[in-house]
Image (tube, rainbow, N blue to C red):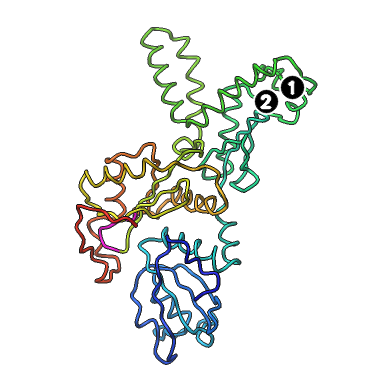
Amino acid sequence: MIPGYPTQDRRIPSPEIHERSDPSIPIATTIGTHPGVVVFLDAHDRIIQTGATSDTKRFIADRLGETDDDPTPSARVTHAEICARVLVWRTGSSFESDWLTLTLARGIDPSLHTQLADRLRTPVLALDRSTMTWRTTDLGADTITPSVSLIAPIRTTDGSRALGERADDLYDLCRYPSELAKAPNGTPCPYKDMCKCPAPCDGSEPLDIYNERAESAFTMIEHGVNARIDELKSDITKASTDMDFERAAQLKPQLDTLQSLPDDVRAHARALSGRTFVIVSRSIKRRWCTVWTLGRTGLTPIATIFADAPRAVQESLIDTIAHDPGLSNLPDPIREEFGLVARALHHKPKSGTTKRTLVLDRAGLTTSTLTKALLQSAPQDRSSENHDPRDEPGEDPSAYNTA
């Protein structure tokens, strides 16, 4: 088989293997029209190309020069002369194809894996408790230290920077970490004169008092901005009810500051440690979905479930998910898989189309949110999509299958 093929990874199903024993017989004629991942091999099982596609039939035909319905000469160099066999994995969604491509590349195609890993580096806000400062970075090995709390997912570096700056404004934190490190012998910045920083850098404020305030800011960020927004709304309402309009007026600017953050930051950015993400994508079987978790052991397809599965079935699945210990050390493979999940979360479908891969947080997972995700991922009417008769479920929808 393929040198380095990760057969020990039980998440990867066996592929369809198509031999080119007679090059005059097109391989594409034996392959259905469906999404998938394709690996072309030469006679020595060396990788020629690995790729994900929404149409495996067309993808293979194009790369083996087996299509003759387009009279325009193609500039692409085909693999017809060197390809001995083709491996095909059928998938139900582009998310599954991307995951499978990444996982295969990690084991069999180092060059492709490096390219994919670079693309999947995702922005984070790093809260460093050793210095009580924050910085914007991406999710790389150098960010994983015991003193650092990582805040994600965030769509852009600008979004993570905005979150840190709002915390500075609300909690009067130091904007110049290099001067704070010199405390109490640092040089105060103009924020001291503007009364927006008590200047712990030059000793005007005891460092332990500053650290307490910074810890409050970090805790607010780790729990999520929306949680603090809800608290502020409640406090403002109570103050107004109690006729304490001065208190309400003091709180309103804080609320406005947090509400000015980008939507994705307010909705999703929280501490990564201990979180488990739940992903719902289409299965290759019509009206069925694949449910994945990203937690302590990485991105794993844990079940296939009928879109209209009864409540008891969904509750059983939620109970299974509840036992995942959540993200922890974030080794390279999990950081890359988190990039896939973050990309799916932030993806905006084209106008007139519906998002089919949904990312949920275990903390907010209920039968209601799961039902909505299942029905959106695998809607009743998929007549416009390409199907193979083998895609029909044929199983009892009152149960789900562990993947």
Mark 2 — residue?
Answer: 174
Q: Secondary structure at mark 1?
A: helix
User: In which quadrant of the rendered view does residue 283 lie?
Assistant: bottom left
Picture disc at residue 267: none
User: In which quadrant of the rendered view does residue 287 lie?
Assistant: bottom left
In terms of sequence position, does the residue under pointer 1 or pointer 2 come before the other?
2
- Which residue is rendered at x = 19% and y = 52% of the image? 398
Say if the magenta span includes residue 289.
yes
How far is disc 1 from disc 2 in space, using C-alphas?
A: 8 Å
What amino acid is found at the position of numbered circle 1 in the picture?
A: Cys
Q: Which residues are magenta?
A: 285-290
Classify 10 Å Cα crowding around label 2: few (below 14), some (14-19), many (20 and above): many
Relative side of 370 to 311, left or right = right
Q: Which residue is situated farthest in the top direction here?
A: 243
Question: Residue 344's x, y, as percent?
Answer: 44, 52
> Of residues 124 and 314, which is closer to you in this image?
314
Classify 10 Å Cα crowding around label 1: few (below 14), some (14-19), many (20 and above): many
Up-down: is 44 above or below 93?
A: below
- Which residue is rendered at x = 27% and y = 65% of the image? 384
Question: Residue 320's x, y, as percent?
Answer: 33, 45
Picture disc at residue 201: 1
> Of residues 346 and 292, which is closer to you in this image?
292
Say if the magenta span includes residue 16.
no
Relative side of 210 to 243, left or right = right
What amino acid is found at the position of numbered circle 2 in the picture?
A: Cys
Question: Residue 36's x, y, as percent?
Answer: 40, 68
- Which residue is rendered at x = 30% and y = 51% of the image? 376
- Which residue is rendered at x = 44% and y = 30% of the image? 226
Q: Which image quadrant: the C terminus?
A: bottom left
Query: Do the residues under discs 1 and 2 have CB atoms within 8 angstroms?
Result: yes
Q: Which residue is situated farthest in the front direction here?
A: 8
Up-down: is 216 above or below 387?
A: above
